[in-house]
Image (cartoon, rainbow, N blue to C red):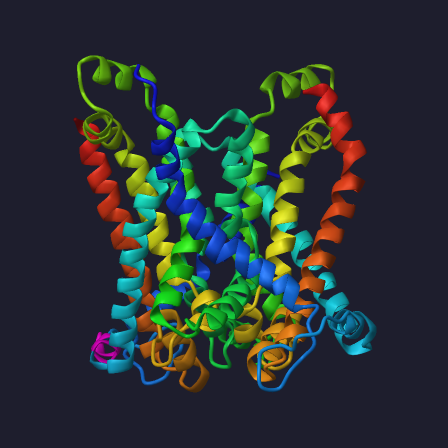
Amino acid sequence: MRKTPLWSTWLLGAPVLVLLFVFLVLPYGEMVAMSFRTPATSAPYGNAWTFAHYLKALGDPFYLGVLGYTLAVGTLIAVLTLILSYPIALHLARVGDRWYLLFYACVVSPLLVGVLVRNFGWMIVLSFSGPLNQILLALGLIEQPLRLLFNLPVVVLGLVHVFVPFMVLPITNALRNIDPALEEASHSLGATRWETFCRVTLPLSLPGVLAGVTLVFALAISAFVTPALLGGQNVVLMPSIVIQQLIGAFAWPFGAALAMALSLAMLIEIGVLTLAMRPLLRRVARWS
Amino acid sequence: MRCLWSVLLALLYTFLLLPLIVVVLASVSGGQVLRFPPEGFSLKWYARFFSDETFISALLLSLRLALVSALVVSVLAVTSALFYRRLSARWRGPFRILVLLPMLLPEILTAIGLLFFLYHLGLGSSMFGLQVSHIVVTLPFSFLAVTAALQQVDLTLEEASSSLGAGALETFWRVVLPLLRPGLFTGALFTFIVSFDMFTMSFLLKPIGGNTLPLALFDYLKYDFDPTAAAAATVSVVFALVVVFVVERTVGLRRAF
């Protein structure tokens, strides 16, 4: 084969490299730099450098409270998503080829539908005259329709719903990679199905669980639309505070610092989780 | 035990599909207010949607953004996938991560970064900025599909083509590109759907008067809660499904050869 000239290689790479450098690397760089700038009234930010925004973001009880609350809600969402997704992943990993595509389509359907349509569906279901209230009324469990919307549980419900695919797919992958001989060996050595699940299947699926939990946690704490629509004014999480600083108050350097603080906190929590899971994963890695 | 397990699974799958079913059924309701189960059957909310100028211009803008993104991203995905294949093993990992970054980073952070940066360039709230942001965010989906397809391309086919006297460009047009077509279609499909549904990015970067369909729906839902919104939502779902169907058909037909 003729040797491909070097200039043609760079011609292929140049458009993407330029695009990503200009519209991804530079914007992130500027955002990090901006979070250390002094505020100004006539320009987005002043000329001097300062650490004050971080001191304010991490020193003010209000912002620190919102940050802690956001991380707690993100953790709750990741745990709930895991609980709902594991049975689906078990089912999807074992379903025959004939039905796989249908169930796969059901699992990814929340993603295909789009963020607004999804939330809108939940708003109808939970509205004052919606089906849930009607069912509860018909069953005689309540006498008056309940106001179900605009609170934290609804936000958690809406977010868990859309994150299920991100949890199911990595766990299904991990489960499909388990050698069936291991489970058969466990059975033939006298373990019950439940024991086999707890001591063979579950530990071997942990890498998938870790991947899913990390992804869902990161997505959960940066979600903006669902909390705004389903939580209304009653649920205050970090992303909406950041947006409010940027668009409402035009406090760009402080908003950038808040966004940075949120990303840092996220990285720390994911790092701690990964380290905590490490001994377990290492034990699992020895078997497979 | 088995029975309980089946019930649990049925409940979980219902949970996943519930919002979609509810929206579609509510959009054909004959009643005046949005309620479920719907009262009677009527297409009047679709008539209202298609005669509403705000919704129609938003729909057209969304379609334009999604189509331009799909076209530009497809070209970029092919060049970057070919570049990726030519890179030495050492640089492949870093390049791959760079291209996938827009998918891995939180959309809201990327949107904020672009908001500052475009404003700085004097392109704040411009159609150009909105289009570029859609291209940057959808690129990873296409790149993944095209690199996966490129891995399946047999290198000996290219060697055969060039040893038979074809130039590099001719080999690309007549051998590599046809083989990449399924991956290219899948990538374009994802790009279209992701761009069509993108909310946070458009919300922060939209030009004045430049509402996309999700933004128009968001504005509408803030003040009204009637089935027109359900009709708008169903229209956007149908567009996504039509694209899936068309691509499935096209790629399916190509594979028949």
Q: Is residue B48 magenta?
A: yes
Whether the magenta-drawn stretch holds residue A71 is answered as no
- Percent position of residue B67, x then y: 27, 57
Specify whether A170 is left or right of B68.
right
Q: Which residues are magenta?
A: B43-50
Does residue A76 sit above or below A85 in this rendering? below
In which image quadrant can residue A143 be found? bottom right
- Residue B215: x, y in percent? 40, 74
Q: On the picture, is B48 further left or further right than B73?
A: left
Assign the magenta stretch its main secondary structure: helix
Q: Position of residue A212 (x, y in %)?
A: 61, 44
Above or below, B66 against A43 in this view is above
From this view, report whether residue A195 is shown above or below residue A146.
Answer: above
> Is the C terminus of chain B in the top left, top right, bottom left or bottom right quadrant?
top left
Q: Nearer the viewer, residue A37 or B233?
A: A37
The answer to whether any part of residue A83 appears in the image is yes
Q: Nearer the viewer, residue B151 or A21?
A: A21
Q: Whole-percent x and y of residue B166? A: 18, 20
Query: Which corner quadrant of the image does residue B162 belong to?
Result: top left
Front residue of B22/A116: it is A116
Q: Which quadrant: the N terminus of chain B?
A: top right
Q: Look at the picture and state if A287 lies above or below B103.
A: above
